[in-house]
Amino acid sequence: MKNHLFSGMAVLLMLAAACTGDKPEFKTETRHYEGSTEHATLTIDAELPVATTEGSAVMRQTLVDVMDNALSRIDSYAKKRYFPRFEGDVNDTDALFDYYEKQSLDEIGALAQEMCDERAQGILESETLTDEEKDKYLDDMPGWGFEFNLKKVYETPSYVVFDSQNYIYMGGAHGGIVGAGPMTFDKKSGMRIRDFFEPGSEEGMQELLRSGMAEYFRERMDDTDTTLEDHLQLDGKLIPLPKWAPCPTEDGLKLIYQQYEVAAYAAGMPEFVLPYKEVAQFLLPEARKDLGL
């Protein structure tokens, strides 16, 4: 069964807007969920557009796909899906989330249980641990945790920005941030704006990138004797543009680098805002038009 992009209510609202000439208000709805199994926890905080126009309907479908991709491959490394895509009406909020909440909790619970069973077997079969040590390690068995986050972070009359940064912990030394990152959508068409910078603009932006990166580390590091190069881990001399698309804000384009992308895990996720007046020359003509520059 194919996904239905428009519920009956959405179609009626669109027709009413077309007849009156009024521009429908961009609306969203939110859903919060917390679930747990013996060795796993799952949290979902999602905000989706309400399909009142063709653009918001297309946008909603794209963001449901983002949620589906994250939750159906919940360990972040899986190349295969753990459960099928939701095949109902994506505008049926209760059915949509009931499905993903159950399926993803069942899956993370099973994965965590499998990991804990393997660790428990290794502990029990150990010939070097005492019985007291075995009991301690079994009692302190780490579980799994996944936090899916999708929210609207910025909006103008012509475009809207959603962000999905999710946290995953799989029983190791620490967790990590995964996800699609910032996503900018044209309100009228509902299409995602993916390309912002002119090809090859990275080299010309080095002064801006270095300045932004230096500000990030200056605010977070106590050691004033270190240089920017001491904090960065790069393959070459150029600071690359982040893999995530930039995030439009009121003051400029926010660049967000993922963990390990340009620095060590302890450095966090370097981010900074490039003012529109400084970055405009490096943007594609289409991006400048989309951003109203």
Image: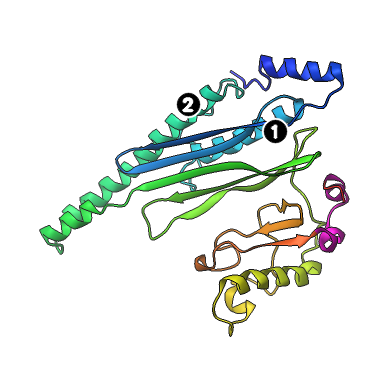
Percent across and percent down for residue 230 are 58, 79
Q: Is residue 126 visible?
A: no
Q: Is residue 22 above or below residue 270?
A: above
Q: Is 41 in front, or is 106?
A: 41
Q: Which residue is mark 2?
A: 98
Residue at x 51% of width, y 65% of height: 265
Q: Which residues are magenta?
A: 276-290
Under mark 1, the amino acid is: Met
Dot 1: few (<14), some (14–19), or many (≥20) neighbours within 10 Å?
Answer: many
Residue at x 52% of width, y 23% of height: 94
Under mark 2, the amino acid is: Asp
The answer to which image quadrant residue 209 occupies is: bottom right
The answer to which image quadrant residue 122 occupies is: bottom left
Percent across and percent down for residue 207 are 77, 72
Dot 2: few (<14), some (14–19), or many (≥20) neighbours within 10 Å?
Answer: few
Q: Is residue 223 above or below residue 189?
A: below
